[in-house]
Image (tube, grey):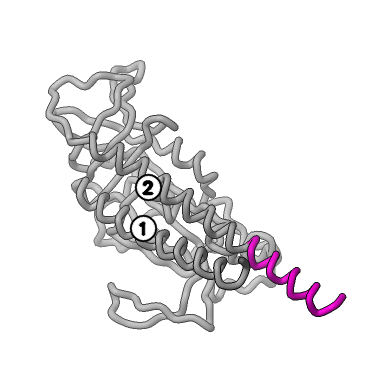
Amino acid sequence: MTTPDVVGLGAILLGGVLVAVMMWALHRLFVIATIVRTLWHASPTDTPEPTPGQPIALTGTVVVDAPAPIAERLFAPTDRPVGAYLWRAWFTDTGRYTYDRERGELRKGRNTFAAGIEVGDVGLTANGHRFGLDFAWLRTLYDADRLADLEIGTPTQNTKLPTFFTRYSWDSLYLAVSTPRGDCDLAQLTDVVSTARESVDTDGFGVEARGLTAGQRVFVYGELRENADGDYTIGGTDTTPLLVSTTGREGLFAHLRWRALKYLLALGGAVGLFVLFVL
């Protein structure tokens, strides 16, 4: 193959990667725009009688009748009962360091290879009613993993993929759950997760979590449903997404603005490189 052919092939490959990045960024920006439009019309309601089948926005207090599975292993004993939590499984990146704002120190980078949502019997109280929270739509949307099904030592699963190839619930645009945080080395969860082989070393693997705890104030938007026993549940659908924020409605707006900036920078960088090296 001649040198011009090699250069041409390289430009095609680079162009393909940059187009993928641009499509990824545009899709995320479209999702953000859709959520912002929904939030704009979703002010917390003081309506005394909820209407099943309709969208509802509420700010209330989290209640936990049964904690989420394995929560007691991930969160500090001093934390209140955790009714639901996001989690991600990670392995260390020895060549990369990030700044941990909570601890005020640098730590080794963490690469996510699995993520999910664990849920107990959790809801919120608002306007004199109790509303259960149903995360089934989000679990399906992200094809969320189950922590109990996690397997360590499988090369095809324990691999860091480029960001635009992944869609983890941990990075969900629909959820702004920041505290409390839990963190645990997988060596302490060997009775929960499984290993592909007995010789697999779990050092350098761990699970990080962010949860909803009893007594926490939370903003929720979703579709209201009435169960056969007369209880209310808030869930999500493709037309009425489930939104949950521990920083309130305005905090969710701020969360989305920050993410939008990230995707705009990625889009601008990809377009610039495409113009410089491909066109």
Left or right: residue 167 compared with residue 240: right
Residue 120, located in which quarter of the rendered image?
top left
* Along the line of sight, the residue nearer the viewer: 60 or 14: 14
Give the Cα separation between the discs numbered 2 and 1. Answer: 8 Å
Neighbours of disc 1 within 10 Å: few (<14), some (14-19), many (20+): some
User: Relative to 136, does residue 193 appear above or below in the rendering?
Assistant: below
Name the kind of residue labelled 1 in the image: Arg
Name of the residue lying farthest toward the front: 279
> Total marks drawn?
2
* Along the line of sight, the residue nearer the viewer: 250 or 189: 250
Q: Quadrant of the N terminus?
A: bottom right
Left or right: residue 54 compared with residue 10: left
Looking at the rendering, the stretch of residues picked out in magenta corresponds to 1-16
* Along the line of sight, the residue nearer the viewer: 27 or 115: 27
Residue 130: give x, y in percent of width and height: 22, 30
Asked whether disc 2 touches disc 1, contact meaning CB atoms under 8 Å apart, the reply is yes
Is residue 7 part of the magenta span, yes or no?
yes
User: Relative to 149, does residue 15 appear above or below in the rendering?
Assistant: below
Residue 248: give x, y in percent of width and height: 20, 48
Residue 21: give x, y in percent of width and height: 54, 60
Which residue: 47% across, 51% down?
Answer: 26
Which label's residue is closer to the chain start, 2 or 1? 2
User: Which mark identifies residue 32?
Assistant: 2
Q: Is residue 54 visible?
A: yes
Q: Which residue, given by chain and number where applicable, does mark 1 sit on?
A: 259
Element class at badge 2: helix
* Along the line of sight, the residue nearer the viewer: 148 or 94: 94
